[in-house]
Amino acid sequence: MNVVLALVGSKWKPTILWRLAEGDHRFAELRRSVGAVSEKVLAEQLRELERDGLVSRTEYDGFPRRVEYRLTGAGRELDAMLEPVGEWGHRFAASPQPQAAGAGGA
């Protein structure tokens, strides 16, 4: 479990993986689809995912330079394992939550 959390234990990495599971993305497409992530943070997270062997980066010749990101086999496998976690999160967020002990005190 610690290995998995070390690989995806950030605010943006699971979302990046889920978006790349939809197919290859260029940087700007990925940034728009991920949400309010800064370019700097997205670039850092992609570098880390690439370093860890979960994402591959392909650079194409031309102007402007075109770079595409895709999941590797390990990235696809991890994404498949994270899918039930995401589904649980949606159910949890949609269900009424009990108040914490002592909340709303008398």
Image (cartoon, grey):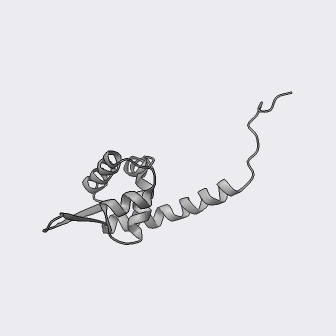
Considering depth in this image, is 21 or 39 the residue closer to the camera? 39
Relative to residue 59, is residue 24 drawn left or right?
right
Considering depth in this image, is 57 or 64 the residue closer to the camera? 64
* Residue furthest to the left: 61
Q: Quadrant of the C terminus?
A: top right
Relative to residue 17, is residue 102 drawn left or right?
right
Give residue 44's position: percent from left, percent from top: 30, 47
> Which image quarter: residue 31?
bottom left
Q: How many marks?
A: 0
- Identified at 48% across, 61% down, the residue is 82
> Which image quarter: residue 71?
bottom left
Relative to residue 50, is residue 103 drawn left or right?
right
* Residue furthest to the top: 106
Give residue 10's position: percent from left, percent from top: 43, 46
Give residue 3's position: percent from left, percent from top: 39, 49
Give residue 25's position: percent from left, percent from top: 33, 67
- Identified at 33% across, 70% down, the residue is 24
- Identified at 45% across, 50% down, the residue is 36
Considering depth in this image, is 59 or 89 the residue closer to the camera? 59
